[in-house]
Image (spheres, helix red, strand yellow):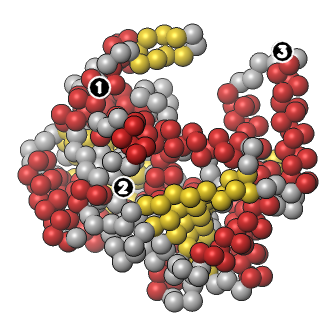
Amino acid sequence: MRTRAYQHQREFIKWARDRQFLPLLSETGTGKTYMALNWLEVNKAKRVLWLEDPVYIEGVTDDIEELSGFKTTVLKGTRERRLRDLQQAPDGIIVTNYETCRTIGPALRSQHFDAVVADESTILKNSRTARYKAAYKYLHDVPLRCIMTGTLVTNSLFDIWAQYLFLDHGRTFGRSFVKFRERFFYPAGFDWQLKAGAEERIQTIISMGAYRKLKKDCLDLPPKLYKRFPVKQTVRQQRAYDQLWNDMELELDNGEWFETKYVLAQLAKLLQITSGGLLQDGKLVQTYPSGKITALRLLLGRLLEHHQGVVIWVRYHFELEQIIKMCRKAGIQGVALTANEDAAESVRIFQREKNCRVFITTLSRGARALTLTKASAAVYYSRDFSVERRIQSEDRTHRIGSEKHSVIEYWDLVCKGTVDERTVRDVAEKRLLGRKLIDRKSIRKIVAGH
C-alpha cells in the first residue's frame, strides 16, 4: 500500500510541476492536502491563503504543520482580530474561512499572496453569493490557484462553472455563465437539460487539465458494502407523518404555490418525524416513540458481534441524544462528538480505547477531517440531501488505516414509504452523476460496480 501511495505522490509532483492553475479532484482519502502542499513547495510559494470550511480549520491546520514545513496562521474571531492577525502573520500558510474574503477582502488583496487554495471548492459553486463575489474580486490577482474537492458536482453540472471561473478566470469554461449554459444546455420548461453529447464534451475538457485519482488506483483499501435496514414507524409517528403530508397535499389541491424554501422546510419536518421528533426554530417541540431507535438497538447488537467499532451518523442533535440514552441503557460504551466536544480528543478515545465501541456524531460536525479507521461499519440513522457530506462521512472509515478490515459496511436505516427513502435515492443519483462526469464511465458500469 505504501509503495502504491508513494508512486501516486511522485506521479502527482511530476504532473503538477509549474502548473499555475491546479484543479485537484482526487477522491477523498487520497491525500489531496499533501498533494497541494507539494505543489506549493515545488512552485516556491512563500505566502499562501488557504480557504477552508470553518468547521475543519483546526484539523487542516494540524495536517499542514504535520505534512509540510509551512508555518500556519489562523484568521478567526472578530473582524478587528482577523485584520490584526493578518498584518502580523509571518510568511507561510494563512488559514481562514471563505467569509473572511467578504469581511476583510481589501486587506487580503494587499497581502499579494503567491497562491490561494480553495479547499472543498463546492462552497464556491454559486457565483451569485456575496461570499463568492468577494473571493473572486479580492483574490483575482493571486498567480497560483488551486481548487480541491472530491465532489465537483453536488447538485447539477451548473456547479462546475463558478468553481472553474475562480480557478482560472474563464480559461476552461469561459467568463460568462449564460454562454456556458447555452453551450451545453437547452431550456426545457422551467428547467435546463443537457444537449446531446454535452456531457462527454465536459468530461473531455475536465480530464485534460484536472488531476483525478480514485482510492482504488493508489491505495489497497477494503471494498464497501451498502445495506439498508427497513424501519417501521410507530403508530404515533405514522399518524403525525400522515397528518403533515395530508396538509401539504391539501394546500396543493387548493392551488397554493410553494416556494423552494417552504418545500425544503416541510421535507425536513417529515424527516424529523421519521426519527421521532419535530423541531421549530431549532428547538425540539414534539417527540414520538421512534421505530428507528428500536431498529438501531437491534442492528447494533448484530454489528458489535462482528465489528470492533461502529460509527453512527445523524442529521439532528435530538437524534444524537436519543442514541446516547439508548447506548447507556444497553451498556454500550462509546463517545459522542457534539458541538461542545473536542474533536481530536473524541477521536483519540474511540481509536485507542478497546472498550469504546461506538462513535456518534452529526453529519455537519464530523463529515470531514476525522480518522475513524477502528470502525469497519457505519450506520446512517438519518441523512440530508448532500452528496458531499455522504461521501465525506463514508471516507472517515474508508481511508489509509482501514486496510486491516476485510470490508467496510454502510447501513442506512430507512422508514418505508416515507421521504426517508427519497434521501437515499437522491444522494445515490447525485453521486452517480459526479462519478460519470469526472471518471468518464457510463451509469451502467458504475451501477454494476466496474
Label 2: element kind: loop
Q: Amino acid at mark 1?
A: Glu
The residue wearing badge 3 is: 255
Residue pictured at 11% horizontal, 59% vertical:
10
Q: Position of residue 370 (x, y in %)?
A: 45, 67
Q: Position of residue 365 (x, y in %)?
A: 56, 60
The answer to whether the residues at label 3 and label 1 have Cβ atoms under 8 Å apart is no
Of the two numbered discs 1 and 2 in the rendering, the one whose residue sits closer to the viewer: 1
> What is the CA distance from the residue labelled 1 to the residue labelled 2?
24 Å
Question: Can residue 417 be seen by looking at this rendering?
Answer: yes
Name the residue nearer the viewer: 111 or 405.
405
Residue pictured at 91% horizontal, 54% vertical:
236
Of the two numbered discs 3 and 1 in the rendering, the one whose residue sits closer to the viewer: 1
> What is the CA distance from the residue labelled 2 to the residue labelled 3?
45 Å
Mark 1 or 2, nearer chain start:
2
Question: Can residue 175 be seen by looking at this rendering?
Answer: no
Graded by Cα atoms within 10 Å as few (under 14), some (14 to 19) or many (20 or more), the crowding at tag 2 reads many
Residue pictured at 40% horizontal, 75% vertical:
405
Q: Position of residue 148 (x, y in %)?
A: 32, 47
Name the residue nearer the viewer: 134 or 24.
24
The answer to whether the residues at label 2 and label 3 have Cβ atoms under 8 Å apart is no
Mark 2 or 3, nearer chain start:
2
Q: Amino acid at mark 2?
A: Thr
Q: Amino acid at mark 3?
A: Gly
The label number, if any, that marks residue 200 in the structure image: 1
Q: Is residue 376 above or below residue 231?
A: below
Q: Position of residue 127 (x, y in %)?
A: 43, 28
The residue wearing badge 2 is: 28
